[in-house]
């Protein structure tokens, strides 16, 4: 069957209240199970071996993608004699479309804002959910739901059937807007296929996920799919980013698109003067940090507005500009958009300041920075704050296993250059040996450690809890302790198992408080 025939079949044999799932653990009697393979190598996910389990659980129908490798005969093919099993051509690509149609295309009536980029997706989507409306929800790394009542799902962008199911649920709960984190894996694997985007936002592109995409060119091309293959009428792009600039040049002749470009300063718009009729600019005329916020003069489509933005770090200031541009693109009046941004609340695990239990605790910060670019930006943000406090920076971080190995020494070099005291530890080692990962990080540290005494500022502590404890106990009250890499995560993945672990909880414990 093709996708149209499959949808017609479902409408004839399945109750309209049935849910669609690609996860057999979520199946209930009378539901629809989709079984197909997506991804590759260690990121390969194949639901077809679970067809028998779905049948035992009482599904009304199984849609599956055929095995195209005729050299093998997988065991799951023996389950296909059941009349409930229907073969669908190109199911991996069409699962989203079928699910969307089954639920009445919820994204057609919701105002769905897709945000993609290496860094900033979570902050931008969370802040959009805070500022758009009380009827704005979010789907992403921190969970699904309205901003004050998220439920965790364990991934950035859900699989295709789950995404459409969640959009349908949010619409039933009264959502009018949904801010969706769109990962490169999701775009490559067709998880957002069948989805209508009202607005698409690009934050930045830097090294990440090369274990999956192979090259930066392929990684960038995958990100660009959100803007080139989906029919978003409103587009918001970070023009400070070189890839963002090239993306704009590719899109500028699309007369059906309204494009907003944002940047930290007007220099980013040099040489674009002749194209002024193709975009609307948002940039900072001036800004300076005082206490816990930036005092800004923002230029929006040629007019200057004062605004106080309560964020930490220029990269977060950039994320706030993405939010401002998106709010205005969505039709919110400029004064109201700026008023909402002045009330932004911190995002969990993103430059999150952890209050110590004792007055003499150092300043403690948790951030999700797990790429070279993100770690460098966090350390650059903390350096002037450390200078004001007349303190030093302790950096605790590691790198995840079964992911891009080449970034490990790069991050070691960045951490060594950007901090005064470095503690290399374990992140989510997954199937790899944590000590080997740490040695790869240390190889980058050695490249910038020229003085003999520098070696005393670097520790290797595989136990992440002990590493955090060491940094906090050594730090003075005027110092800053940054724990990077896991951010909001509440578990640590080791050899296929997840153990409870929170950087925030261990910082509180190390500073004399209770977990």
Image: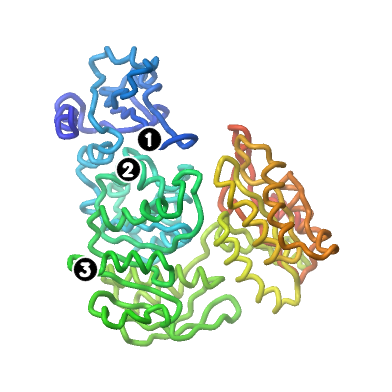
Q: Which residue is located at x 52 percent, y 64 percent?
A: 346
> Which residue is label 1 attached to?
38
- From the image, tell me which residue sits under label 2: 190
Q: Quadrant of residue 328?
A: bottom left
Determine whether, in the image, residue 316 is placed left or right of residue 269. Answer: right
Q: CA distance from mark 2 to mark 1?
A: 9 Å
First-in-chain label (1 vs 3) = 1
Can you give x and y, in whole percent of width and height, for residue 464 in the image?
71, 47
The answer to whether the residues at label 1 and label 3 have Cβ atoms under 8 Å apart is no
Q: CA distance from mark 1 to mark 3?
A: 34 Å
Residue 323, x across and y down, in percent:
39, 68
Is residue 151 at all visible to an observer of this figure?
A: no
385 or 370, which lies in front?
A: 370
Residue at the image point whose x is 26% and y is 31% from the top: 18
Rendering coords of residue 265 (x, y %): 44, 80
| Residue 142 coordinates in the image, percent (x, y) | 48, 51
Disc 2 and disc 1 in contact, CB within 8 angstroms: yes
- Nearest to viewer (mark 1 / mark 3): 3
**Residues marked 2 and 3 touching at CB (< 8 Å):** no
Taking the spot 72% from the left edge, 42% from the top edge, the residue there is 435
Q: Is residue 458 left or right of residue 378?
A: right
Which one is closest to the eye, mark 2 or mark 3? 3
Provide the secondary structure element on which disc 3 rests.
Answer: loop
In this figure, what is the number of numbered marks?
3
Lower position in the chain sequence, tag 2 or tag 3 = 2
Q: CA distance from mark 2 to mark 3?
A: 26 Å
Quarter holding residue 5: top left
Color encoding of the figure = rainbow
Q: Which residue is mark 3?
A: 253
**Helix, strand or loop at mark 1:** strand
Q: Secondary structure at mark 2?
A: loop
């Amino acid at each position: 069957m093709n996708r149209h025939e499959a949808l017609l079949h479902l409408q004839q044999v399945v109750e309209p209240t049935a849910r669609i799932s690609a996860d057999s653990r979520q199946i209930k009697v009378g539901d629809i199970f989709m079984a197909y393979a997506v991804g590759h190598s260690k990121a390969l996910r194949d639901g077809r071996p679970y067809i028998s389990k779905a049948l035992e659980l009482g599904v009304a129908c199984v849609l599956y993608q055929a095995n195209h490798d005729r050299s093998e005969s997988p065991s799951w093919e023996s389950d296909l004699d059941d009349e409930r099993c229907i073969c669908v051509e190109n199911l991996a690509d069409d699962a989203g479309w079928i699910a969307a149609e089954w639920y009445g295309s919820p994204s057609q009536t919701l105002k769905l804002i897709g945000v993609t980029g290496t860094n900033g997706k979570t902050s931008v989507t969370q802040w959009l959910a805070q500022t758009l409306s009380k009827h704005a929800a979010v789907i992403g790394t921190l969970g699904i739901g309205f901003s004050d009542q998220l439920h965790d799902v364990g991934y950035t962008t859900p699989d295709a059937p789950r995404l459409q199911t969640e959009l349908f649920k949010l619409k039933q709960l009264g959502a009018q807007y949904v801010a969706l984190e769109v990962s490169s894996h999701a775009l490559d694997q067709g998880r957002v296929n069948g989805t209508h985007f009202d607005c698409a936002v690009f934050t930045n592109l830097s090294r990440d996920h090369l274990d999956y995409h192979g090259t930066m060119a392929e990684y960038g091309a995958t990100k660009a799919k959100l803007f080139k293959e989906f029919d978003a009428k409103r587009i918001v792009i970070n023009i400070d980013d070189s890839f963002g600039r090239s993306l704009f040049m590719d899109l500028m002749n699309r007369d059906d698109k309204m494009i907003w470009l944002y940047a930290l300063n007007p220099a980013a718009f040099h040489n674009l003067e002749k194209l002024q009729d193709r975009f609307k600019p948002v940039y900072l005329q001036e800004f300076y940090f005082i206490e816990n916020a930036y005092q800004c003069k923002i230029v929006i489509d040629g007019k200057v507005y004062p605004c106080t933005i309560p964020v930490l770090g220029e990269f977060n200031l950039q994320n706030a500009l993405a939010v401002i541009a998106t709010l205005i693109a969505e039709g919110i009046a400029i004064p109201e958009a700026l008023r909402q941004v002045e009330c932004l609340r911190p995002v969990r695990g993103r430059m999150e300041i952890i209050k110590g239990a004792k007055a003499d605790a150092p300043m403690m910060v948790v951030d999700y920075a797990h790429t070279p670019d993100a770690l460098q930006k966090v350390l650059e943000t903390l350096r002037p704050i450390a200078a004001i406090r007349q303190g030093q920076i302790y950096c605790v971080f590691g790198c995840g296993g079964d992911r891009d190995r080449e970034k490990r020494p790069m991050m070691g070099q960045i951490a060594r250059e950007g901090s005064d005291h470095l503690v290399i530890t374990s992140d989510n080692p997954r199937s790899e040996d944590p000590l080997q990962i740490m040695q790869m990080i240390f190889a980058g540290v050695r490249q910038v450690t020229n003085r003999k005494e520098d070696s005393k500022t670097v520790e290797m502590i595989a136990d992440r809890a002990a590493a955090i404890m060491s940094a906090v106990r050594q730090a003075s009250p005027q110092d800053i302790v940054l724990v990077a890499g896991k951010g909001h995560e509440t578990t640590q993945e080791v050899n296929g198992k997840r153990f409870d672990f929170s950087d925030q909880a261990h910082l509180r414990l190390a500073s004399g408080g209770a977990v």
